[in-house]
Amino acid sequence: MARFILQRLRQGILSLLGLVLLVFVLARLTGSPAHLYLPEDASPQMVAAFNAENGFDKPLYIQLVHFLAGVFRLDFGESLLYGDPAVTVVLQRFPATLQLASVTMLIAVTLAIVVGAASAARRGSYGDAATRLGSMAALSVPDFWIALMGVAVFAVYWNLLPTSGMGGWQFWVLPLLTLALRPFGILTQVVRASMLDALDSDYVRVAKSKGVGPGAVIYKHALRNAAIPILTVAGILAAQVVNGALVVETVFGWPGIGNLMVTAIKGRDFAVIQAVVLITGAAIIVLNFLIDIAYSWLNPQIGLGE
Amino acid sequence: MTLLNNDQENVENDSAEEAPRLSLRAAARSGPEPLRAADGLWRKVGHLLRRDVLGIAATTYLVLLLLTTVVGSFVLADSARNTNLHLRFVPPLSTQYGWEYVLGSDALGRSFLAQLTVAARTTLLISIGAVIAAAVVGALIGTVVGYARGRLDKVAMRIADVMLAFPSLLLALIVLYTLGAGLGSLILVLALARIAMYTRVARAETLAVRERVFIRASRAFGAGSLRIVCTQILPVIANPLVALATLEFALVMLAESALSFLGLGVHEPDVTWGGLIAEGRNYLQHAWWIALLPGLAITLTAIATNVLAELVRKAAESE
């Protein structure tokens, strides 16, 4: 177990290093960094002064050392748009996205387990067919589009919910629902498929023949054994919720890192872009590490196998 | 698309291994054909389609979409460009201003039907291009590392894990930012994000076939690794890769539309469905159709290809 955790920790650190290198390569090898950091109308004097000040006129390997040292001190430079250090700007926005993403995943996982399990239990019924089509539609809809349609109907036309911002529960309804749609669709399919497998297995048949009620068979015996594939997919999706957050936060003006990233790209604020990518990457590596541990706890054979 | 047409070679490889199958296959030809393991992938998909209402609906939709796009991009190319400020924001579902305006018009009075059709061509071309690029590169890498094994294999799989764990859109945004938006970098970014999927599948399939008799025989006859990978392994593992590519199409199209929505898509005058939605965002209140219709088109196309992908997967698994 300890060896497994250590190995995963080493892999996580290596992944993070890879990400840091990728950002460095992208930032330095695609042209002058001054072009990335400075506004587009910067004068040649400004560019030269900027290059000298930040050491961009030095050889590449010295720049790499500087860059790595900066990353270790969590120093990504100052934000062009906000004037504060980029890390501060990103960390200020992080909680809003984290809250949105975790509540989204909670809703998606809970709903998917209930709907997927019920659908598997009534295999071949109209409800099952509706669930299959519904989950297919849910994972096929562009999230930013359904967000816009939600705004058009509930906020603009019926005036029931606010169009954008963050505040009371009314502000959460549309972002949560639109963001949960895709993970819900994918997870429902996974839950349904793994529940069908579990319901076909010998131990469920034994439980049934022992006279265990249908509810207990589904939610106690079958679901526990279907948990591992569900957890795996939920973990992958939790990281991919950032994809949805990027666009959905823009539509709803949610003060999170998705919104920040898009604003930074439009405002050519490269320090912030770098910080968002590296901090999100670190968060996702930590998340994967936690999932690996939960995984080996659910199924002790995995830790031994590696 | 050459990967798709390897049915002949498949049969030859299999028949070299198990001769009796050939006669069975010939016998089956005369009668009504049952679903057989040695049949080509698309024959099997066709067979599965016959019993699947949803599958038929999805295929019909996709065929109609392709036809409309191909014909429409010739017939409607002019009306997609012609602005008419007297006909701004004509609401849809009326033929008062001619059939081109059946789906309404946009802020510049252009036929929205024409806009949708022209955008369909760009959207489909970008998505198909990215899917094919990712499939070819990913499959080659996966087959090579799966055949070579060892250190190279381990490193490649580690990189694939990291690429799949990281949110693809975030990666796409930073690459597009440094490279600049445009058709080429858009396809590059969309393909880059998905290569790892094909690498994984191709590697797993290669590991399963690399010790089979016909490949061991080729090795014994002195065939080089590259030759074995290209002429023997790739044709045999093509079906699961085609199934994956069908499944990936909707994903890539959704990613493309999100990037276009954020303003990092193709440049004017080219436009995709996602770009049309971004435009419609400004007119949500009085011209709802501009945002609604392209979104519907994306959703329907994604559902249809996902339904088809499930059939292709079933067909590929029935070997």
Image (spheres, rainbow, N blue to C red):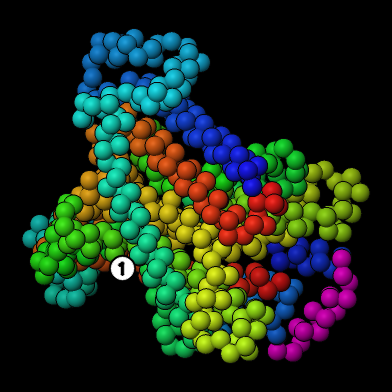
In the rendered structure, the answer to whether residue B213 lies left or right of residue A274 reads right
- Residue furthest out toward the right: B220
Secondary structure mostly seen in the magenta stretch = helix
Q: Nearer the viewer, residue A188 or B48?
A: A188
Question: What is the chain identity of the residue bearing mark 1?
Answer: B
Q: Residue at x 38, y 59 (%)?
A: A105
Residue B288 belongs to the span the image colors magenta: no
Amino acid at the residue labelled 1? Leu
Residue B23 belongs to the span the image colors magenta: yes
Above or below — where is A144 with respect to A113? Answer: above
Inspect this view and state whether residue B267 appears: no
Rendering coords of residue B274 (x, y %): 31, 55
Give, as a single range, the part of the protein colored magenta: B17-33
Give the total of numbered labels: 1
Rendering coords of residue B308 (x, y %): 51, 71
- Looking at the rendering, in which quadrant would you find the N terminus of chain B? bottom right
Local crowd at mark 1 within 10 Å, few (<14), some, or many (≥20)?
some
Q: Quadrant of residue B313?
A: bottom right
In the rendered structure, the answer to whether residue B64 lies left or right of residue A4 reads left
